[in-house]
Image (tube, rainbow, N blue to C red):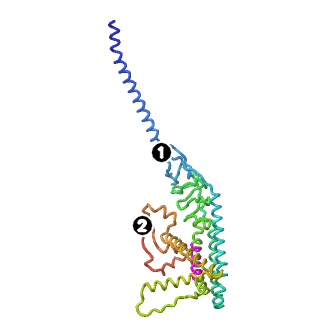
Amino acid sequence: MFSIIIHLISSPHRLKVANAEMQEEDQSTSTNEDRDQSTSANEDRETNCWGCGLRVSVAAYASVFKCGWCGAITKEHVVKSDNIRLRRCLDHFFVTIVISFMLFFICAGVWAVYPIIFSVSNFRGVFHLAIIVILSICTLLSFCLSAFQPAGVPPLIIWGSFPAVGQGGLDNYTFCHYCSKPKSPMTHHCRSCGTCVLDMDHHCPFIGNCVGAANHRCFILFLLSTVISTFYVTIMTSYSALQIWPHPEDEPVIRLSGYANPELIVGVLKETILAFLRAAVFLPVRGLVLVYLFLSSLSVSIGLSVLLWQQLRYIYVGKTYLSHLRAVNSEEVMERDCQNLVRFFGCPSTTTAYLPSYWKSRKAHTK
């Protein structure tokens, strides 16, 4: 009886001791598992460099690493989804629209403007007709060169073999998973064209092509010739429209003497403009075409002038549009000089000796 009482008294204590020992074992097990996981996470792993083929030891959590021998940069876990069929169809559609618009502009301008110019003087008609032929040929030729020639094919680089790739031979090169070949720092893959482009500036849907190292100059010449042509069409259509515009019969005639009241001047201008617009109802078809050409050429010339100024500003700094976007948050030092324009257009280096000195500046930070 006494032994039974002692066993009942001591059993709760034994249960508490057993529970404590089990908790200590669980804690030690979890601690060992955490140590194993942290050790495995800190352990380096080995992989092959795509540039030279050597074994590279990298951290287990690193998704981007650079080879210490050839300098090639490897980016892992790249997801490829490249469907260019719809984009190419849209590019072809835009190119068709642009070519049709330019041909309509040329034909309608010749039909609407030059009979009026020839009625004034045959010499003026021949002179302006020669100007429009030269501008049309320059615009169409520069458009075709920028639209239908390759934008810029990157040079072929030997890669994948250690004996062929020297030390630092692929410095800062990345691997294009779309084209399955190396990509230099100045090369960008265009998903609309489905190829890598050297010195890519941007993809222009209106020419259906990228603007790169091979056609950037043609693209600038196309913008320049288009701006000059549309500005010329704006002047000629306005002159021709004024020649055939019907004169209003009820034209206000007001003689001002002495002090001119501002309200009276505003009233005269208002009546004149309204009479001018009322006369537009009697315009022939040629006059309506002239009005449309005037408004279209004016809007196109303003828009393309802004684009041309932006392109020339990037060239002056020595950048492209994509490199400008990449350097927005960096403190990259670029040289602003007219030498960049001279090198871009392929002019002799002695040309800069005749340029004004205030066009040149040493170096500036781009923000």
The answer to whether the residue labelled 2 contacts the one labelled 1, judged by CB atoms less than 8 Å apart, is no
In the rendered image, residue 123, in percent from the top left (x then y), is placed at: 64, 91
In the rendered image, residue 295, in percent from the top left (x then y), is placed at: 57, 77
Q: Earlier in the sequence, mark 2 or mark 1?
A: 1
Is 209 drawn above or below residue 80 in the view shown?
below
How many other residues sit within 10 Å of disc 2, few (<14), some (14-19) or many (≥20)?
few
Question: What residue sits right under mark 2 in the picture?
Answer: 365
How many other residues sit within 10 Å of disc 1, few (<14), some (14-19) or many (≥20)?
few
Is 187 drawn above or below residue 296 in the view shown?
above
Identify which residue, 153 or 251, lies in the foreground: 251
Residue beneath the point at 58% across and 88% down: 249
In the rendered image, residue 219, in percent from the top left (x then y), is placed at: 58, 71
In the rendered image, residue 260, in percent from the top left (x then y), is placed at: 42, 89
User: Which residues are the magenta region?
Assistant: 220-235
Q: Which quadrant of the rendered structure holds the N terminus?
A: top left
| Type of the residue with mark 1 | Tyr
State the image quarter where residue 103 is shown: bottom right
Identify which residue, 240 or 347, lies in the foreground: 240
Q: How far apart, in angstroms, are the residues tagged by discs 2 and 1?
A: 35 Å
Residue beneath the point at 63% across and 62% down: 90
State the image quarter where residue 280 is shown: bottom right
Find the residue positioned furthest to the top: 1
Q: Does residue 230 belong to the magenta stretch?
A: yes
Q: Determine the main secondary structure of the stretch shown in magenta.
A: helix
Q: Does residue 269 belong to the magenta stretch?
A: no
Identify which residue, 213 or 85, lies in the foreground: 85
Find the residue positioned furthest to the front: 250
| Type of the residue with mark 2 | His
In the drawing, what numbered circle is on residue 61? 1
Is 145 drawn above or below residue 164 in the view shown?
below
Find the residue positioned furthest to the bottom: 257
